[in-house]
Image: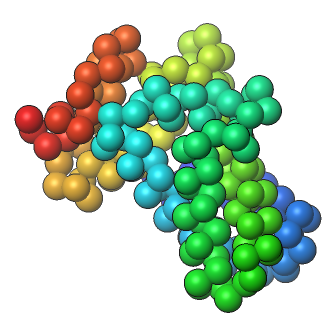
Amino acid sequence: MLDKIMEMVGGDAISAITEKAGVSADQAKEMLPLAGESLKEGLMSQVTGGNVDGLLGMFKSVSGGGLESNGIFGGIKKMFMTKVMSSMGLPESVAGLVAGSGMGSIIGNLAGKISADGDTDDIDASSLMNVLGGGDGGMLGNITGMLGGDAGGGMMDSLKDAAKGKLGDIAGGLFGK
């Protein structure tokens, strides 16, 4: 699912990176897998920590213009920046522009898709789960699989509970506790 998400939002991210950071389109394309890894790692740390509300807050902050001040976004952006510096050999100033513009574009596009997927055009746990993927092929399902869980249970059951208004203990559900 992450590959599908990156395909959906990658073109906009490449444009944002080339326009704001001044790197070539080829360099920007090379950075997309690094952005995908950073996004996956950042989302996984929030989900396994039970911070669904925090993730929802990050996606909601896009519409209010507060994405740059969101702590979760800052952490994902920093991961991306570090990967760009070490893998691409770019200086911190350029890598910072790449990370900010690229990840901002990706999160912004995802927020739009999450909002459009919901019944109320609002960003909620149910629409988040639908876009990021709750089954075997979904991004969150893949994260569960990477951690040795069952994509149909544990963490996904907790996310379903969160979608119904009960946050549940995602980390406990993930590890069967």
Q: Residue at x 24, y 43 (%)?
A: 151
Q: Residue at x 68, y 55 (%)?
A: 103
Q: How is the image coloured?
A: rainbow
Question: Is the residue 24 above or below the residue 40 in the image?
Answer: below
Q: Quadrant of residue 30?
A: bottom right
Residue 2 place in picture, x, y as percent: 49, 55
- 122 or 3: which is nearer to us? 122
Q: Is residue 152 visible?
A: no
> Along the horizontal axis of the image, is 36 left or right of 141?
right
Quadrant housing the C terminus = top left
Q: Residue furthest bottom?
A: 89
Image coords of residue 37 (percent x, y):
49, 64
Residue 91 percent location from the top left of the image: 75, 82
Q: How far across and down, in percent of the image, does residue 21 sit?
A: 85, 69
Please give left or right for residue 167 compared with residue 60 in the image: left
Which residue is at 46% across, 26% downward? Answer: 53
Picture quadrant where residue 115 is located: top right
Above or below, comparing residue 142 to residue 52 in the picture: below
Image label count: 0
Where, by quadrant of the figure, is residue 12 drawn? bottom right
In the image, 78: left or right of 92?
A: left
Along the viewing direction, whichever of 172 and 18 lies nearer the viewer:
172
Q: Is residue 157 above or below residue 31?
A: above
Which residue shows up at 58% across the image and 84% down it?
A: 86
- Residue at the left extreme, as displayed: 177
Q: Is residue 26 visible?
A: yes
